[in-house]
Image: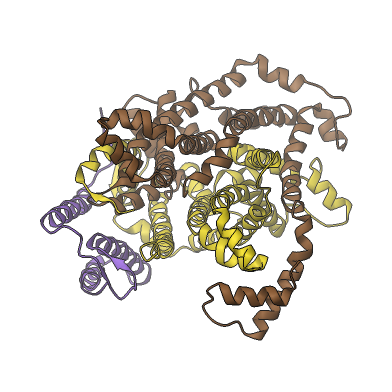
Chain colours: A purple, B brown, C yellow
């Protein structure tokens, strides 16, 4: 069975690896302290930490897209903004 | 009929309104009611007109399928002047046509069985238990309906090539699971949540094992739900073209793909095209006929 | 229903998960890989970085197609949802009319999508179609091949014809599931037809409407086969929706990289809109 057609590259491997590790990390966190810490944040509906991770990831994707569309190809700044955004989401949403 | 003002007053008294209605809103409601009051005797007009609207294009297709090509392009008539079944004969005598129907039916049935079979235990889990990541899993399932199939066609082809499944019925059946399984889980979960949990508990106390309880007691209770889920799986698998066409070449080619090829190859044989179209309606119509009572009754039982 | 916490439930979900993952995850990852590379075929790829994303995000063509898609989804939702509710409200509740209505209404749903396209392509043609001929006969200049507005009307009419029944079926199911006691109570109170709809029927329809709107939004946003068969994206680019553009790019020009980048952006947008909608529609369930 040949999977060379999937055209893996180092950055995409790193990308999916990070996402996978995040899932594993969340599962361990959930196992250690179950319940997901539900609360009502600034979005006015109940979120668990899984929801907060989803909001962070989706928001980061759009931050990166906006940076590419409006500013330029240097994505390290977009990554920095995304990290700040994710911390904000986990803190306040 | 009750006087309009009186009705409004009663409504305002009994039904919990968020805010007292201001005069403008009140007159608006009254006007709407008067309109409804007179229209209600002709309620059947709404579905009747809608069905006529639905049937007109289908009638036109049937009409065309019974005409010769010269009549289709030459004259304009509301019904065939010289009815002919030549177009249907073309399809029934040519293996490249009728095998398309057989292929489509094979993979659609495979897909329906497969989708419902894996969706049943999953839906049971979603309806009865909370577990790690359940809500996110449920939403993730839905996202599988959101990816545009256009670009996924190439990776799909590569993936099924890697497993040597290209041009087999099972390949199409597996690929269609991508959007049918989530739907089946969604529908079945609704029906299962409508069955009280006490039934499960009583059965376990009576000494039923889980598989026996599921087959003997639970499945009959949600039979109509299974019917509805199977109907939707059949429907979406039957109507899909893009993935089915990508994954097949000759041996498992679906009828819909045969149609597109013939249109481009032999110029425009309108009559045969129309006849082929009419024949694609028949399996669907049969399936609806068999599940009609499930749709009417079945949906009602579940919370859908 | 209060559910018990049991992680062994994962074993019941597992077969389903593996089956869907097989067809979902591998192609999705492959598309992401394509989107950062350039290829000339034969599985030879060159690193391109974020070039395609920049190109797509700054192209008029993409935003135009996106605008058309949003407009299309909005228009057909605005027509199909109210129309579907109206028809479901006026459906017969018992007797021979029920199966008849259901069978006839479900028929368009079970027609293969390219056949739907063919039906409307023929039906609307000025030379051999009923609709085209009748409109011409009463003096309306209608030609979906030449006029962008007529092409839009045809495509929207086709979608309404094709999919309103789904909304009707779901709403009808929701309406039938309302116990008779609710209606009796309303009748005793002398509630008007509108009040019954607003305070009894509409709240009960919430769940089925969630399903109907989500399904219709997702499917209309990636509509491909039907408008492609009817108009082929034309006249000009007036009915070139995102999926049609994608296929032109991926198959017609074999620009896999840009097409993959475009479908990722497209997927993210559908994901965002669907998530917002799903969250809004289900966030009240816990309170009730």
**Quadrant location of residue B28?**
bottom right
The image quarter in which residue B268 lies: top right
Seen as rendered, the residue at the extreme left is A32
In this picture, residue B51 sits left or right of residue A78: right
C187 to B151, vertically: above or below: below
Task: Pinpoint residue B162: horizontal percent, then vertical percent.
Answer: 31, 29
Task: Name the residue at 29% across, 56% down.
Answer: C49
Q: How many marks?
A: 0
Quarter placement of the N terminus of chain B: bottom right
Seen in the picture, residue C98 relative to A33 is either above or below; the reply is above
Please give the name of the residue rendered at 38% of the width and 50% of the height, measured from the top-left corner. B143
Q: Residue at x 76, y 70 (%)?
A: B34
- Picture coordinates of residue B115 (x, y %)? 40, 34
Residue B197's spot in the image, x, y percent?
33, 45
Q: Quadrant of residue B295?
A: top right
Relative image position of residue C252 (x, y in whole percent): 50, 43
Residue C73 versus residue C236: which sits nearer the camera? C73
| Residue C47 in view in this figure | yes
Query: What's the residue at 43%, 32% (across, down)?
Result: B220
Instruction: Answer with left or right where residue C23 lies relative to residue C253.
Output: left
A34 vs B10: above or below: above
Q: Is residue B167 visible?
A: no
* Up-down relation of residue B109 to residue B222 (above or below): above
Q: Nearer the viewer, residue C205 or A81?
A: C205
Q: Return the residue found at the far bottom.
A: B23
């Amino acid at each position: 069975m040949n999977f060379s057609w999937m055209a893996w590259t180092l950055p995409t491997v790193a990308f999916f690896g990070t996402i996978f590790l995040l899932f594993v990390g969340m599962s361990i966190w959930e196992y250690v302290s179950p319940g997901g810490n539900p609360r009502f944040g600034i979005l006015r509906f109940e979120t668990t930490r899984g929801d907060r991770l989803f909001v962070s990831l989706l928001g980061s994707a759009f931050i990166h897209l906006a940076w590419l569309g409006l500013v330029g190809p240097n994505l390290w700044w977009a990554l920095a903004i995304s990290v700040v955004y994710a911390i904000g989401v986990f803190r306040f949403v | 009929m009750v006087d309009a003002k009186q009705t409004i007053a009663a409504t305002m008294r009994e039904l919990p309104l968020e805010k007292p209605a201001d005069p403008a809103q009140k007159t608006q409601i009254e006007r709407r009611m008067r309109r409804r009051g007179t229209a209600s005797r002709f309620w059947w007009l709404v579905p009747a007109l809608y069905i006529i609207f639905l049937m007109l294009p289908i009638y036109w297709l049937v009409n065309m399928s019974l005409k010769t090509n010269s009549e289709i392009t030459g004259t304009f008539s509301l019904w065939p002047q010289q009815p002919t079944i030549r177009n249907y004969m073309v399809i029934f005598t040519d293996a490249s046509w009728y095998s398309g129907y057989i292929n489509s039916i094979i993979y659609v049935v495979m897909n329906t069985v497969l989708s419902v079979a894996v969706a049943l235990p999953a839906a049971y889990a979603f309806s009865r238990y909370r577990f790690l990541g359940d809500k996110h899993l449920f939403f993730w399932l839905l996202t599988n309906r959101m990816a545009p199939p256009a670009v996924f066609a190439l990776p799909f082809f590569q993936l099924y090539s890697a497993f040597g499944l290209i041009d087999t019925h099972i390949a199409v059946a597996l690929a269609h699971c991508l959007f049918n399984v989530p739907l089946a889980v969604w529908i079945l979960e609704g029906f299962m949540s409508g069955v009280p949990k006490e039934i499960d508990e009583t059965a376990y106390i009576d000494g039923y094992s889980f598989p026996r309880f599921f087959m003997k007691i639970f499945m009959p209770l949600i039979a109509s739900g299974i019917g509805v889920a199977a109907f939707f799986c059949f429907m979406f698998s039957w109507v899909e073209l893009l993935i089915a066409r990508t994954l097949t070449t000759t041996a498992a080619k679906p009828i819909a793909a045969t149609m597109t090829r013939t249109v481009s190859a032999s110029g425009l044989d309108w009559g045969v095209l129309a006849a082929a179209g009419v024949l694609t309606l028949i399996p669907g119509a049969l399936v609806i006929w068999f599940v009609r009572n499930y749709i009417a009754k079945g949906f009602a039982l579940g919370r859908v | 229903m209060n559910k018990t916490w049991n992680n062994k439930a994962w074993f019941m979900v597992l077969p389903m998960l593996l089956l869907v993952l097989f067809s979902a995850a591998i192609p999705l990852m492959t598309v992401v890989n394509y989107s950062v590379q350039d290829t000339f075929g034969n599985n030879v790829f060159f690193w391109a970085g974020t070039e395609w994303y920049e190109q797509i995000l700054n192209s008029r063509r993409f935003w135009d197609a996106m605008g058309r898609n949003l407009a299309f989804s909005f228009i057909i939702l605005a027509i199909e949802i109210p129309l579907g509710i109206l028809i479901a409200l006026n459906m017969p509740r018992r007797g021979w009319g029920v199966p008849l209505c259901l069978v006839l209404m479900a028929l368009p749903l079970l027609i293969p999508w390219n056949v739907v396209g063919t039906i409307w392509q023929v039906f609307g043609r000025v030379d051999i179609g009923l609709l085209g001929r009748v409109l011409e006969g009463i003096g309306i200049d209608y030609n979906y091949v030449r006029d962008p507005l007529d092409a839009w009307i045809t495509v929207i009419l086709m979608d309404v014809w094709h999919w309103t029944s789904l909304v009707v079926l779901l709403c009808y199911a929701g309406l039938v599931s309302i116990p008779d006691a609710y209606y009796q109570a309303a009748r005793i109170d002398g509630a008007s037809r509108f009040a019954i709809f607003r305070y009894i029927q509409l709240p009960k329809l919430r769940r089925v409407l969630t399903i109907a709107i989500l399904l219709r939004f997702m499917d209309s946003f990636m509509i491909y086969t039907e408008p492609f068969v009817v108009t082929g994206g034309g006249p000009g680019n007036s009915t070139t929706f995102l999926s049609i553009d994608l296929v032109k790019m991926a198959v017609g020009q074999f620009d896999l990289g840009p097409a993959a980048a475009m479908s990722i952006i497209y997927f993210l947008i559908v994901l965002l809109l669907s998530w917002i909608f799903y969250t809004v529609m289900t966030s009240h369930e816990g309170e009730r």
